[in-house]
Each structure stands twice: as structure tokens, then as C-alpha cells.
Image (cartoon, rainbow, N blue to C red):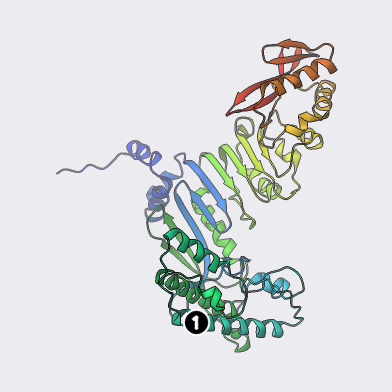
């Protein structure tokens, strides 16, 4: 069978429609493909940048620190979230002590409701690190005793449904204290299957506890373990593959690895990277390539909103500010930069509170879709003040704010429109709307529509 080499034009077309991961892979292996790849627009359906990972469509790239000279010869992950206490680690010192400990000391046992290194809430106040470590070692000894209890325990043959057995096991897993198990607690394990699961879980927890204490033993014995950064690829149901190992030397190396990964994927491209859905939810601020430009359909921010928006604003193609949609989910009364948000014409906004006038008036975007329940907003005179403000400031044509009321009754919505006609004598009634004349041949229209069994109220500046 004769084979024919693709000419450049044909190869360009093939590369353009390749999965991004395949393009990255070929570009890393074949220098001639790399040059061609960077000249062809890169299109991504969904891009997610989070803490210590980048996800491109269905392919996830993680970069993590591992101790690679463990006794069992199985690398142990030390960065990211600790399964025992939920704490986050970005860096470790020469002995393996996590950065959150070097900055603030061992957590817990300070008289506050704070989990200790092993994830227990313990209000005992222990002033010294030595005292903390002694307490943790006692907990580890108890955990090993609990493991022995499980090895010896034989459940009675009680006839129960699988659902009841599972519910009983969930109660057992929820036990949270650092004592050996009582007979009543062990009896929550109703079958050999769940006893074995408890043994497996306890064995894993003991290993994690030992690994969390190990850095302090290393320091005491002046042992400096070997650490590596592993860059790992995971595609759908396929197994994880390590694509690069980097010797971990000092603080900041992990974030540098993330920046290098970003550079490899997105820098030196001759065209804007086109991303339909871009989500950035990182607490660790990984810098974007300085020469990168992205055309974004929907930018979604759920955490550290202002900091992440400031980080990506320089790489956003100008057309995205007008045509793209910014979606933000504000949590815990987080302060946000409204001037920076206003660069986007289209905004979808939500937070944990009910909608109120001071918040609504802060937004200067052309189109805003609120996800908060606006029921109380229309129960008082807040919306009347908002209408007066729009009339006073002469909002430009095309301005549109949409409010969900979570209200299924049409007569309630009609009552709101009636209030508008009462407060504004010049208002005129239309089909499912009320229009209030504005200057420059425009009108402020309040209208409503039914959407998924609830009514939306829409404020729009329209031509007359």
C-alpha cells in the first residue's frame, strides 16, 4: 500500500481539528509540528484552571509534590489537600514540613474550634510544639489499637437489609474521637463486608498519620528526604500517566512548574486561543503567559474573584469584553472590584444573600442577569428607587437587568407593574410590560416572562 506525506495545507487542517491534548503531545515530540501548531488557532471547549491543575476539555494536567524515597517505595503526595485535616499545602521545607505549619505552627489544640494535624477537634490548649507532637503520637497509638480491635471483631449474623447495613456503617464512619471503640460502636458494623472496609480505612488512616508526623522525625534526626514534582495527565477513564518528573529544590518550585505548563500549552501562539467556557478557581495565583491572548465565550469565577479577574484581564482579547459573558459566584461577602467587572458588557451574578438595592446599583454592566432571589427586592420600595436612579442617570439604550422572583403567581407580578404605574404618572401599560419615558427618545421598560415555573422581571432601556 502506497503512503503519501501530507502537504503543509492538509497538515494544517488535520492539526486544527485535533483534540488539544493530541496537539500538545505531538508538539512536545516533533519540533516541526510544534512550529506549525503554534501558527494554527487552538480551540478549546472548556478550560479550567484550579489549584495545582489545568483541565483542557476532558484531559486534566496535575502538578504535585511527592516524597519519592519512602520506606515502602511508593511515592507519597505531600502537596494539595490533606485527607486527614483538609489543610492545603503548596510547599514543604527540607524536612518535608508543610508550609502552613512553618507559617503558623501546628494547627489545633489552641483552645479554638480548629482541627489538629489528624483532623480532630480538640479544645485542649497545648502551648508547645513538643506537647502537640506528644499528643498526636498518643492518638496514633490509639488508632493502632482500634485497628487491632477491628481485626479481632466478628459481627453477629443479624438479618438486615443492605440499606440498613450501609446506614449503620455510615454512622460508624462518623465516629469522631481519639479513644478506642466501645462495644456499642463496634456493633454498628453489621457484616464482614463492612468490618473489612473499616479495617482498610483504618490502615490507610494510620499510614497518613505516620506520614504527617514523619517530617518532624526527619527534622529531629536531620534527615532530608527526596522530593519530586510529578506532572500527571488523566484522560477520562484512562489511568494516570506521569509525563514529567522535576526535582523539587526550594519554595516556589511547584508554582513555577504550573507556570511552565501554561507556557508550554499557550505561549508563542500567533492567534488568540479560542475558549468557549473558561473557569478559573485558584487560590494559588499562577501567572499567565505574557504573550497569551484568549477569546472567551463565558468566563466563570467562583473563588478569589477580584484577584483571579485581575490575573486574567491582560490576556483577554478585547472582543470578549463585549461579546463574552462573565459569570461570578460570590461567597462569604467577598469584596470584588466592580470597576474591573464593568469591563464586561454581559454579567451573570450570584451570591449567598437576598438581592438589595446597594448591591444592584454597584453594577455598571450593560446586561446583568441576577441568580439571587429578588422576591424581597420587589416587596419593598427598593426597585422604585432603582427605577428613579435609572431615569436620573439616563441609562444608555440596551441596558438590561434581569431578576428572578421564584414566584409562580402571575397576579403578584401584575401587582408590581401596577405599583410602577402608581409611582410614575407618565408610565404607560403595554403587553406584559410598563414603559416609563426617558430622555433621548428612549423608555425604561419593566416587563415579565414565565421561565421554568417562575417569573423573571426584566428592566430594559428601549427605543421609543
149 vs 264, nearest the viewer: 149
Neighbour class for label 1 at 10 Å: few (<14), some, many (≥20)? some
Is the residue 47 above or below the residue 426 in the image?
Answer: below
Identity of the residue furthest to the front in this view: 159
Identity of the residue furthest to the bottom in this view: 221
Residue sitting at 44 percent across and 73 percent down?
A: 195
Residue sitting at 46 percent across and 46 percent down?
A: 57
For the N terminus, the quadrant is top left
Question: x, y percentage for residue 33?
Answer: 38, 48
375 vs 73, nearest the viewer: 375
Q: In what element is the residue under mark 1?
A: helix
- Which residue matches tag 1? 149
Which quadrant would residue 298 be assigned to in this image? top right
436 vs 147, nearest the viewer: 147
Question: x, y percentage for residue 214?
Answer: 57, 81
Residue sitting at 80 percent across and 19 percent down?
A: 419
> As drawn, is 274 to the left or to the right of 97?
left
Is residue 231 something that shows in the picture? yes
How many marks are shown on the rendered structure?
A: 1
Which quadrant would residue 178 be assigned to in this image? bottom right
For the C terminus, the quadrant is top right
Is the residue 413 above or below the residue 232 in the image?
Answer: above
Amino acid at each position: 500500500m502506497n503512503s503519501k506525506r501530507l502537504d503543509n495545507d492538509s497538515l494544517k487542517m488535520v492539526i486544527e481539528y485535533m483534540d488539544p491534548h493530541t496537539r500538545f503531545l505531538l508538539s512536545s515530540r516533533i519540533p516541526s509540528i510544534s512550529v506549525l501548531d503554534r501558527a494554527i488557532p487552538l480551540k478549546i471547549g472548556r478550560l479550567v484552571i484550579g489549584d495545582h491543575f489545568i483541565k483542557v476539555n476532558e484531559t486534566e494536567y496535575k502538578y504535585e509534590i511527592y516524597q519519592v524515597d519512602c520506606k515502602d517505595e511508593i511515592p507519597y503526595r505531600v502537596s494539595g489537600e490533606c485527607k486527614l485535616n483538609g489543610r492545603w499545602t503548596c510547599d514543604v521545607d527540607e524536612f518535608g514540613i508543610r508550609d502552613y505549619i512553618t507559617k503558623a505552627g501546628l494547627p489545633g489544640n489552641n483552645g479554638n474550634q480548629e482541627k489538629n494535624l489528624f483532623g480532630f477537634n480538640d479544645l485542649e490548649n497545648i502551648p508547645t510544639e513538643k506537647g502537640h507532637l506528644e499528643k498526636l503520637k498518643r492518638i496514633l497509638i490509639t488508632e493502632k489499637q482500634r485497628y487491632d480491635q477491628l481485626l479481632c471483631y466478628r459481627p453477629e449474623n443479624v438479618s438486615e437489609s443492605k440499606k440498613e447495613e450501609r446506614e449503620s456503617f455510615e454512622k460508624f464512619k462518623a465516629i469522631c474521637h481519639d479513644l478506642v471503640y466501645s462495644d456499642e460502636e463496634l456493633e454498628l458494623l453489621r457484616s464482614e463486608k463492612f468490618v473489612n472496609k473499616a479495617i482498610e480505612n483504618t490502615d490507610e488512616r494510620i499510614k497518613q498519620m505516620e506520614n504527617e508526623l514523619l517530617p518532624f522525625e526527619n527534622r529531629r534526626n536531620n534527615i532530608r528526604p527526596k522530593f519530586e514534582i510529578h506532572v500527571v495527565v488523566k484522560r477520562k477513564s484512562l489511568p494516570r500517566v506521569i509525563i514529567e518528573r522535576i526535582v523539587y529544590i526550594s519554595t516556589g518550585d511547584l508554582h513555577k512548574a504550573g507556570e511552565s505548563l501554561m507556557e508550554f500549552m499557550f505561549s508563542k501562539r500567533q492567534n488568540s486561543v479560542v475558549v468557549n467556557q473558561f473557569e478559573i478557581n485558584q487560590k494559588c495565583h499562577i501567572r499567565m503567559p505574557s504573550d497569551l491572548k484568549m477569546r472567551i465565550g463565558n468566563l466563570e469565577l467562583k473563588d478569589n474573584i477580584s484577584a483571579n479577574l485581575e490575573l486574567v484581564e491582560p490576556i483577554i482579547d478585547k472582543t470578549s469584553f463585549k461579546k463574552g459573558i462573565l459569570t461570578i459566584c460570590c461567597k462569604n461577602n467577598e469584596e470584588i472590584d466592580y470597576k474591573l467587572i464593568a469591563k464586561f458588557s454581559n454579567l451573570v451574578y450570584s451570591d449567598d444573600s437576598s438581592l438589595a438595592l446597594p448591591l444592584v446599583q454597584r453594577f455598571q454592566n450593560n446586561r446583568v442577569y441576577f441568580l439571587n432571589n429578588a422576591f424581597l427586592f420587589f416587596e419593598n420600595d427598593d426597585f422604585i428607587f432603582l427605577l428613579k436612579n435609572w431615569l436620573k442617570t439616563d441609562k444608555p439604550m440596551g441596558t438590561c437587568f434581569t431578576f428572578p422572583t421564584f414566584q409562580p403567581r402571575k397576579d403578584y407580578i401584575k401587582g408590581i407593574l401596577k405599583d410602577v404605574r402608581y409611582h410614575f404618572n407618565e408610565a404607560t401599560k403595554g403587553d406584559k410590560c410598563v414603559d416609563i419615558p426617558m430622555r433621548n427618545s428612549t423608555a425604561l421598560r419593566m416587563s415579565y416572562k414565565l421561565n421554568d415555573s417562575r417569573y423573571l422581571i426584566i428592566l430594559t432601556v428601549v427605543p421609543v
